[in-house]
Image (tube, helix red, strand yellow):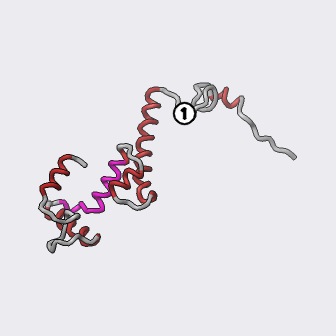
Amino acid sequence: MFPDLAEAIAALPSSHLTFLVTDYGKPFSVAGFGNRFREWCDQAGLPHCSAHGLRKATASRLAKRGCTPHEIMAVTGHQTLEEVERYTREAQRAGLADSAWERFAAGRRGPTSDEGSGPTSGKPVADIRKNAPVARQTG
């Protein structure tokens, strides 16, 4: 837990295991928390924000930082890998695109290039075509 968050939680007057409670001192229901969060966002001048959006942004940022799906699940409370995999897939795709362009700009070969053959071998295309297998009709 971040030190600032731990300090803020410790300063809250609460005798509950749940530190965000309703006006009646009871824990929020899922829907009730979403509705109250919506009100807090509106009061703060953030009508485009929501509890779900915050959870999604957290999962995406954790994935972009290289966290595993299980680590993300532990933070966000997602119940299944499928729920969280969309965030890790998006982050991996972005990371792979970045590394591909870095490799291209530096003129480095990738892990799929077979030294001495294939389109990334550096050989002229004519030489590659000359040695390529050809399907022949039989009959």
Residue at position x 20%, y 68% from top? 36
Residue at position x 67%, y 26% from top? 127
**Left or right: where does residue 64 sit relative to residue 128?**
left
**Left or right: where does residue 57 sit relative to residue 79?**
left
In the depicted view, which residue is nearer to us: 21 or 100?
Answer: 21
Residue at position x 59%, y 27% from top? 121
Q: Is residue 124 above or below residue 95?
A: above
Answer whether residue 48 is magenta in the image: yes
Picture mark count: 1
In the depicted view, which residue is nearer to us: 108 or 124?
Answer: 108
User: Dot 1 surroundings within 10 Å: few (below 14), some, or many (20 or more)?
Assistant: few
Q: Is residue 4 above or below residue 53?
A: above
Q: Secondary structure at mark 1?
A: loop
* Amino acid type indicated by mark 1: Pro
Q: Quadrant of residue 12?
A: bottom left
Residue at position x 34%, y 53% from top? 59
Q: Is residue 59 above or below residue 137?
A: below
What is the magenta range?
A: 46-62
Q: Is residue 73 above or below residue 23?
A: above
Q: Which residue is mark 1?
A: 111
Q: Position of residue 14 (x, y in %)?
A: 15, 63
Magenta stretch: dominant SS?
Answer: helix
Q: Position of residue 22 (x, y in %)?
A: 18, 71
In the depicted view, which residue is nearer to us: 133 or 37?
Answer: 37
